[in-house]
Image: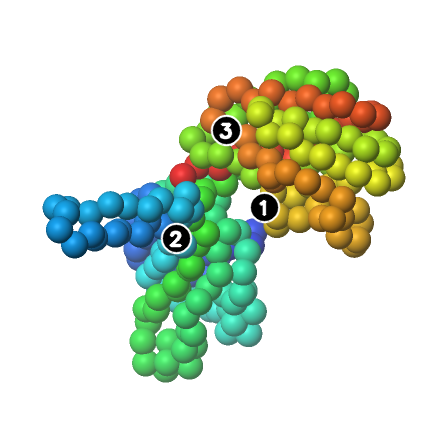
Amino acid sequence: MLPFFIFNGIDSSDYLIVKKLPSIFKAEKNIKKIEIEGRDGFLTEDFGTYKSIPKSVECTIKDTIDIDFLCSWLDGSGEVVFSNEPNKKYKATIINQIEFKKIFTTFHSFIIQFDCQPHKYAFDNNLISLASPGTIYNPYTANSKPILKVYGNGSITLNINSNNIYLTNVIDYVIIDSELVDCYRDTVLKNNDMDGEFPEFLPGSNAVSWTGTVTKVEITPNWRWN
């Protein structure tokens, strides 16, 4: 099978011939190296985050192609899947300016530069619903940053492992979005009604419990790999 990529749900095989896919590698950690005068070697400060990953795809155009469609498709941000990692998807932005005129008049090959967020995301992102305290199992290698929709009223304490999250003034429901690092209801921010760290699910078992008037908690897990 020839290599391909899928960007925002569109398969490159329909429009392009992919000559070379990007290599598979882990994102570089954000680590500061500290050298101290009079001391051998160095110390490190690990910020616990990762850098973005540039991924280049070398392509050749097919004979019959709509340049207006190509300009519209290969632009902006979205999800990309590469055929050498078919069970993973990246959140990416196309960062280079593709000179389509040169492609058609002079060259047959060109480069698409995807600037990918550091984590690979699983296709399995099914909603998990808890009507009573329980355990969530993270089968992947990285901490996930879930979206939690907490249904209830009044003051609620939500516990994820040892992380206590205090919610006040809840009316019907509130959403805790660990990827956006925001707490909200509909379009209204509720960060001032939340106290505590935004939750993450560690690889393995994660205990979820609560106190207060809660009818259920719906979880979009956002499973991912490093």
The one nearer the camera, 82 or 66, is 82
Q: How far apart are the alpha carbons under marks 3 and 2?
A: 20 Å
Is residue 138 toward the left or the right of residue 111 in the image? right
Q: Upstream in the sequence, badge 3 or badge 1? A: 1
Can residue 65 be seen by looking at this rendering?
Answer: yes
The one nearer the camera, 133 or 169, is 169
Q: Residue 101: name its quadrant.
A: bottom left
Task: Report if the CB atoms under discs 3 and 1 are less than 8 Å apart.
Answer: no
Is residue 145 toward the left or the right of residue 209 in the image? left
Q: How far apart are the alpha carbons under marks 1 and 2?
A: 16 Å
* Secondary structure at numbered mark 2: loop
Q: Amino acid at mark 2?
A: Lys
| Crowdedness near tag 1: few (<14), some (14–19) or many (≥20) residues, C-alpha within 10 Å | some
Residue at mark 3: 202
Residue at mark 1: 179
Residue pictured at 43% horizontal, 74% vertical: 97
Is residue 48 toward the left or the right of residue 28 in the image? right
Q: Quadrant of the C terminus?
A: top left
Residue at mark 2: 51
Q: Residue 177: name its quadrant.
A: top right
As drawn, 87 above or below 161: below
Residue pictured at 39% horizontal, 53% vertical: 51
Point out residue 46 in the picture as x, y percentages from the top left corner. 35, 44
Q: Amino acid at mark 1?
A: Glu
* Secondary structure at numbered mark 1: loop
| Crowdedness near tag 2: few (<14), some (14–19) or many (≥20) residues, C-alpha within 10 Å | some
